[in-house]
Image (spheres, grey):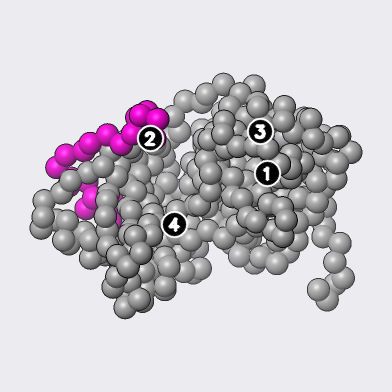
């Protein structure tokens, strides 16, 4: 099992990545930046339904600051949800601003409430870290999930990812009556494969969510990453395989009861083929992103060498030993995918 890692070093957004973000409409001038939110006066702990401290604090601001922040934050929410059309957001209000000082990105969480029906939604403002931005964009290009985010200067804005936190799902839903175990087992196999191929690390149960969607008489499940700080950072191969984290053990043991080795290999092959197909569809954009990533030092040199050695052993391929950055290792990893079985005109 993978032991906890030391806190990740944040990396600034370099010109090549900034150029990519601007070209593909990820760079956006925002009415509120991260620094403006740091002017809070007091913070009060938020507890969950069981009385446990969530490590989030709800903040108070001066009336003047809160009025200005509310206007700007509603505009940001309109950018995320309605291409900036504030006219359809008139019935929305900012009901709470929370802060978590223990996360790598030290996020602010904004709660938006619909005044007409009390429905609520969230989005986040975080310190812009290049690793996280690459992780978000790779998720958008190589997974079945679409990611909505913007970057302005040193501020990252992210849409809320909906789902049941993985640790809560394991504790409260894994043994529900009528639960079709093979579906979640299949999804975890595909999720595990996806994380490893695209080198997304630290997918412990509290760093992913389970999205459940009713489908005729049954329910479909999708496991979605929600923390991208550890994109291509650690040197251990096992760090990129969710199956090796103690926090996921119950899910692994559950999967063993509901899936045989032959089925597991089938789903691994399916996921590799799907990623290869997505790469083909987004070839130009992905190449642009990887060019920027290959030029950056997104991890200490010793971690790059360690991961290169681990991937060489895993794939029996010496090309990884020639890589000097995490971006080069990722590009080489993606090159080992099988080509999609499509006709040339598809």
Query: Closer to the N terminus: mark 4 or mark 1?
Result: 4
* Cα–Cα gap, marks 4 and 1: 21 Å
For label 1, count other residues whose C-alpha is less than 10 Å away and answer few (under 14), some (14-19) or many (20+): many
> Which label lies toward us, 1 or 3?
3
Q: Secondary structure at mark 3?
A: loop
Whether residue 21 is visible to the viewer of this picture, yes or no, is yes
Can you identify the residue that label 3 sits on?
175
For label 3, count other residues whose C-alpha is less than 10 Å away and answer few (under 14), some (14-19) or many (20+): few
- Residue 339, percent from left and from top: 82, 57
* Cα–Cα gap, marks 4 and 2: 22 Å
For label 4, count other residues whose C-alpha is less than 10 Å away and answer few (under 14), some (14-19) or many (20+): some
**Mark 3–mark 2 CB contact (< 8 Å):** no
Q: Which mark is residue 159?
A: 4
| Residue sitting farthest toward the front | 177
Residue 321, compared with residue 247, is above or below; it is: below
Q: Secondary structure at mark 4?
A: strand
Which residue shows up at 59% across the image and 53% down it? 139
Instruction: Return the residue nearer the eye: 141 or 95.
Output: 95
Query: Closer to the N terminus: mark 1 or mark 2?
Result: 2
Query: Closer to the N terminus: mark 1 or mark 3?
Result: 3
* Cα–Cα gap, marks 1 and 2: 28 Å
> Which label lies toward us, 4 or 2?
2
Which residue shows up at 76% across the image and 50% down it? 271
Q: Which residues are magenta?
A: 32-55
**Residue 136 painted magenta:** no
Which residue shows up at 73% across the image and 64% down it? 280
Q: Secondary structure at mark 1?
A: helix
* Cα–Cα gap, marks 3 and 4: 30 Å
Query: Closer to the N terminus: mark 3 or mark 4?
Result: 4
- Residue 285, percent from left and from top: 61, 65
Can you identify the residue that label 2 sits on?
48
Q: Quadrant of residue 104?
A: top left
């Amino acid at each position: 099992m993978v032991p906890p890692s030391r806190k990740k070093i944040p990396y600034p957004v370099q010109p090549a990545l900034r150029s990519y973000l601007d070209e593909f409409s990820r760079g956006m001038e925002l009415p509120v930046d991260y620094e403006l939110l740091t002017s809070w006066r007091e913070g009060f702990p938020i507890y969950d339904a069981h009385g446990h401290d969530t490590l989030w604090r709800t903040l108070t601001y001066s009336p003047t600051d809160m009025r200005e922040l509310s206007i700007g934050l509603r505009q940001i929410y309109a950018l995320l949800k309605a291409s900036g059309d504030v006219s359809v957001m008139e019935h929305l209000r900012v009901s709470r601003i929370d802060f978590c000082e223990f996360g790598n990105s030290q996020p602010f969480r904004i709660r938006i409430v619909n005044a007409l029906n009390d429905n609520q939604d969230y989005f986040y403002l975080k310190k812009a870290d290049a690793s996280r931005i690459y992780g978000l964009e790779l998720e958008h290009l190589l997974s079945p999930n679409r990611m909505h985010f913007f970057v302005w200067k040193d501020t990252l804005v992210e849409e809320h990812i909906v789902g049941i936190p993985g640790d809560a799902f394991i504790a409260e839903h894994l043994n529900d009556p009528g639960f079709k175990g093979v579906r979640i087992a299949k999804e975890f196999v595909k999720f595990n494969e996806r994380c490893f191929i695209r080198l997304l690390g630290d997918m412990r149960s509290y760093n992913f969510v389970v999205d459940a969607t009713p489908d005729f008489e049954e329910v479909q499940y999708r496991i979605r990453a929600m923390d991208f700080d550890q994109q291509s950072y650690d040197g251990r191969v096992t760090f990129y395989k969710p199956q090796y984290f103690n926090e996921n053990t119950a899910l692994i043991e559950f999967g063993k009861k509901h899936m045989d080795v032959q089925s597991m290999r089938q789903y691994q092959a399916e996921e590799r083929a799907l990623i290869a197909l997505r790469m083909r569809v987004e070839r130009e954009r992905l190449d642009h992103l990887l060019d920027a990533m290959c030029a950056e030092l997104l991890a200490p040199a010793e971690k790059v060498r360690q991961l290169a050695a681990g991937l060489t052993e895993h794939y029996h391929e010496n090309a990884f030993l020639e890589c000097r950055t995490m971006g080069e290792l990722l590009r080489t990893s993606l090159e080992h995918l099988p080509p999609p079985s499509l006709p040339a005109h598809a």
